[in-house]
Image (cartoon, helix red, strand yellow):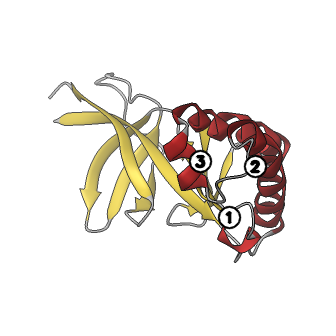
């Protein structure tokens, strides 16, 4: 039987329709930081949208990284739990790392501001796919033939969830 070692990534979109306090905090703080940081790439105020600024100055792509710093404390408060992603029993799925990105923004219209946070899990072992669910266990499954039982969880395949790393490994038969 073959197993697969995987990492999952989940993309959370945050815009003016933010519902949770975390989403609202990220929306407001990232917009305020964007307004401050974008000035370095738009000195003459000739552009109003993120797309225009990025198109005119490729170095503006670093704003994803710079603006991302402003939400670091909010992400830390998540205690490594991906918001909005739970297993089949309602348990939160932990993440190992995250990446912030500006999807869209406009210096004249806060309602146009949209960001995403991509959360990536630690290594998981994919044991199989059952319908719309992945059967997973945390970490690497030991190749111990005497091992009788492992703790597993099931996660529904859904929009914004992706396998971001994949490696096959054989198990003893």
Using the numbered discs, state the Cα–Cα distance from disc 3 to disc 2 in whole angstroms.
12 Å
Q: Secondary structure at mark 3?
A: helix
Mark 2 or mark 3, which is nearer the start of the sequence? Answer: 2
Residue found at x 37% / y 29%: 147
Work out how far the residue at label 2 is from the one at label 1, CA to CA, in angstroms: 9 Å
For image coordinates 78% across by 56% down, the residue present is 31
Q: Is residue 95 visible?
A: no
- Dot 2 alpha-carbon crowd within 10 angstroms: few under 14, some 14 to 19, many 20 or more: many
Pick the front one: 140 or 75: 75
Q: Position of residue 83 (x, y in %)?
A: 66, 59
- Residue 71 occupies quadrant: top right
Is the Cβ of the residue at disc 2 closer than 8 Å to that at disc 1? yes
Which quarter of the image is occupied by the N terminus? top left
- Quadrant where the C terminus sits is top left
Q: Name the quadrant containing residue 129.
A: bottom left
Which residue is identified by label 2? 34
Q: Which mark is residue 53?
A: 3
Q: Is residue 173 left or right of residue 96?
A: left
In front here: 106 or 73? 106
Tag 3 and tag 2, C-beta contact below 8 Å: no
Q: Which residue position holds label 1? A: 113
Who is closer to the viewer here, 73 or 166?
73
Between circles 3 and 2, the one closer to the viewer is: 3
Q: Is residue 29 left or right of residue 38?
A: right
Considering only vertical position in the picture, is 88 above or below 30?
Answer: below
């Amino acid at each position: 039987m073959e197993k697969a070692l995987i990492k999952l990534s989940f993309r959370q979109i945050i815009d003016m329709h933010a519902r949770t306090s975390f989403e609202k905090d990220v929306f407001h703080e990232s917009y305020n930081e964007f307004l401050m940081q974008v000035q370095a790439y738009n000195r003459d105020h000739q552009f109003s949208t993120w797309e225009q600024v990025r198109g005119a100055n490729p170095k503006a792509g670093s704003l994803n990284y710079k603006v991302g710093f402003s939400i670091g404390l909010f992400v830390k408060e998540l205690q490594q739990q991906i918001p909005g992603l739970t297993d089949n029993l309602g348990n939160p799925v932990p993440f190992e790392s995250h990446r912030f990105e500006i999807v869209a923004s406009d210096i004249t219209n806060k309602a146009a501001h949209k960001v995403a946070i991509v959360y990536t899990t630690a290594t998981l072992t994919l044991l199989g796919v059952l319908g719309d669910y992945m059967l997973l266990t945390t970490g690497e499954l030991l190749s111990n033939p005497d091992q009788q039982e492992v703790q597993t969880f099931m996660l529904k395949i859904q929009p914004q969830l992706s396998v971001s790393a994949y490696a096959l490994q054989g198990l003893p038969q």
